Each structure stands twice: as structure tokens, then as C-alpha cells.
Amino acid sequence: MNDQKLKFGLVGAGAIAQSYVQAFEHCETARLVAVADIREEAARALAHGARCEHHTSYQAMARRSKLDAVIICTPPDNHPGICLYFLERKVHVLCEKPLSVELKAAKLMIETARQAGVKLTMASKFRYVEDVVRAKAIVMSGILGEIVLFENAFTSRVDMSSRWNANPKISGGGVLIDNGTHSVDLMRYFLGPLSEVQVVEGKRVQGLTVEDTVRIFVRSVGGVMGTIDLSWSINKELDSYINIYGSHGTVFVGWRQSKYRQSSSPDWVVFGRGYDKVQAFRSQINNFARAIRGEEALLISAEDSLASVEVIEAAYAALRRSHWTTVNHKVGSVTKPAGVAAANSTAA
Ligand SMILES: NC(=O)c1ccc[n+]([C@@H]2O[C@H](COP(=O)([O-])OP(=O)(O)OC[C@H]3O[C@@H](n4cnc5c(N)ncnc54)[C@H](O)[C@@H]3O)[C@@H](O)[C@H]2O)c1
């Protein structure tokens, strides 16, 4: 029933906010009561579709709409200021990824939520995809044996030349923080805390001041290695976005189908029908709302949100430091391995 639903506000009426509006339709735990955006046209249009109020500032929304919780859908540099504003007013906050582009600000957000006694979580939609949840249960069951390798790729061609995503003052970096925040959160979800990270940058083909293609190498505390490919400039055209390989089997989480195979069996077992964005967003809102009501734990705790910021910060440090060993290819000076006679030495 409507009255028992928590009242939510949305800050930012841009691209991702559209997915939230879709998710609020048929949402059993929460309803959208207000939208705020500094672009009045955007706020009005979104609010019209969602049949709710609109405001031209989040402060006005906080004053005029009685809210239990907000979802922050503005560009990343704004996240700390807007989140702190609501947390200090004891409004629960679900903040889009990345929680913050700075670790210090992320810690302040978490401490503020703790002191205010309200929930703070970071949006990370893939954790709520039903196939991802099932794949995690398969991994945890042990039927794939000892997990050795985790692979993930989020690659698609997007022209970022005129978008804030490629302005590091707003976004904190390039594809590494943009798509990589999802990736490191997923790897932590499956394999626990991460201990080491290395990043290699690909050729920049968009002429941006930030990285548009990277390969990340990660190791979990439990010793599982991971490789993650991220790009705004190529599309790997893969059927699956997560592949996990164990000593007794493999699981693929795919865009259209998910399946696993144990090495003892010739057959793949299909366990899911792929990625459903609206389902994932709705499950995310439901988990957040139920956590506010004390009915279940947050799937992504404040500490999980902070861990993503920490791993991405470490990844940028690795990218800056990136150590390569030069291959010595000097023509005509091939060194003779000890004990091997050169072909022409006897002929001389
Ligand atoms: N979960 C996902 O899959 C996913 C996908 C895309 C984006 N995102 C994240 O969502 C956030 C928003 O991304 P987007 O692509 O929707 O951006 P966008 O540029 O399309 O929309 C951002 C909106 O915020 C508004 N805005 C900016 N400052 C504001 C302020 N102070 N008060 C109110 N409104 C303000 C802008 O006017 C704009 O309408 C980012 O953190 C991004 O990383 C997540």
C-alpha cells in the first residue's frame, strides 16, 4: 500500500535517473515523491513522467518534500556535498557510483552517516542482477572447486569527447573509475577483499585527457587472480561479462544467458536469462528500503562502498607508477646462451 512505502527523492534528472524512475514503477517498498535538478526542464520532464513534484535545487526539495531517503544521481564531484547535506538532516542516502572521487571525502560521508544513525550505500547495480546473485551461490557452494581466476569486461564504444565522464575534475578520471567501480565491487562480492592491483593503459583513441581503455590485474586476499578489461573505445563483443574459473568448473554470467559447467560433466547448466536492468535497479531500491526499515541488511554496506573507492585509488596509483621492463631487441647483438656454439663458429 502506498502509505506504507518509504518516500524517496531523486537528485539529478539525467541519464541514470531515467532507470530509477522505471524501477519505481511496481516497486513494493518505496515511491518517488520528488525530483530535483538544477536544469528545470530536466526536473520537470522526469517528474511529469513519474507523477511527482519537481524542484530546481536539492535544498528546496529537502525543505518542501517530506523525504525518508534520497538517491543521488549527479556527476561524481557533487556526491560528497549533496550526500552530507542529506545525511546531516537524517535522510537515508543511496549514492550513485563512485561514492566519491576522493577517499577523504568518502570517509567523511561514512562517518557522518554513522553519527546521524542513517543508512548510506553506494549504487552498484550488478550485485542485484538475479544471475549474479545465483552465480555467487554457485561459487559459494564449492561445486566449482577452488576458484583460481576471475574475469570481467565492461567494454562498449561511447564517444566521451563532450561528456563530463572524461573531465577528471568532475569524474575523478576516465574509464577506470567510471566502469571500474562496478568491476572492483563485483570482484569483491564474489571473492572478498582485494589485496593488490596493477593497471595497464591501452592506446588512447578518443584524444581524451583521461584513459579510455585499461586492463586491470587484481589479486584477492584469498589469492584469486583477476583480470578486468574496461573500455569506452572498443567492444569485445563478449556474451558474458563475468567468467569465474575453478579447479572443478567454470561459471559464465552473460548478458542474455548465464551457465556453469562442472569438469565432471559434459553439459552446461543454464541457470539464468541474462541482464535485466530494471529488475536490478528495483532490487537495489528494495534492499535499501528494507534495510532502512530494519528488515534486512544492506547488500552494499558503507564499508563496501568505501572499499571500492580505496581499490580505485590504488588502481590509479598503479597506473601512474606502471612499471614495464624493456625488451632488448638490438639487431645483430643476440647474446649466445652459455654452452651453445654459434652456427658459424666452426665454419670459420
Ligand atoms: N549505475 C550505473 O549503471 C550508472 C550508469 C550511468 C551513470 N551512473 C552514475 O550516475 C551518476 C549520474 O550520471 P548520469 O550519466 O546520469 O549523468 P547526467 O549528466 O546524464 O545527469 C546528471 C544530472 O545531474 C544534474 N545536476 C548536476 N549538478 C546538480 C546539482 N547540484 N543539483 C541537482 N542536479 C544536478 C545535471 O543537471 C544532470 O541532469 C554518476 O555518478 C554516474 O557515475 C551510474
Image: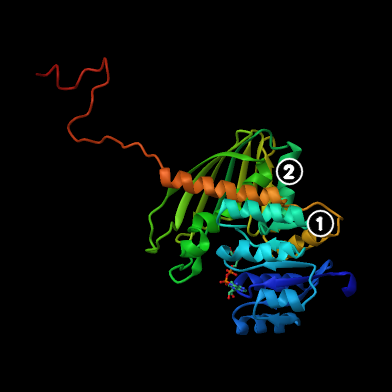
Judge whether 208 appears above or below 223 on screen: below
**For residue 203, what is the image quadrant?**
bottom left
Q: Can residue 194 be seen in this view?
A: yes
Q: Is residue 240 visible?
A: no
Callout 2 amino acid? Ile
Q: Earlier in the sequence, mark 1 or mark 2?
A: 2
Label number found at residue 291: 1
Give the x, y percent position of residue 305: 66, 52
The crowding category of the residue bearing disc 2, from other C-alpha atoms within 10 Å (few below 14, some 14 to 19, many at least 20), is some
Estimate the spatial distance between the alpha carbons at disc 1 and disc 2, rounded to whole Å: 25 Å
Q: In this view, does 207 lie to the left or right of 7?
A: left
Q: Residue drawn 48% across and 66% down? A: 158
Label number found at residue 138: 2
Label number found at residue 342: none
Kindly report which numbered mark, 1 or 2, lies closer to the viewer in this rendering. 1
Give the x, y percent position of residue 282: 75, 65
- The colour scheme is rainbow
Callout 1 amino acid? Ala
Which is more toward the observer, 193 or 236?
Answer: 193
Quadrant containing the N terminus in the rendered view: bottom right
Give the x, y percent position of residue 84: 67, 62
Q: Residue drawn 42% across and 47% down? A: 320
Judge whether 69 appears above or below 184 on screen: below
Give the x, y percent position of residue 58: 67, 74
Judge whether 130 appears above or below 2 on screen: above
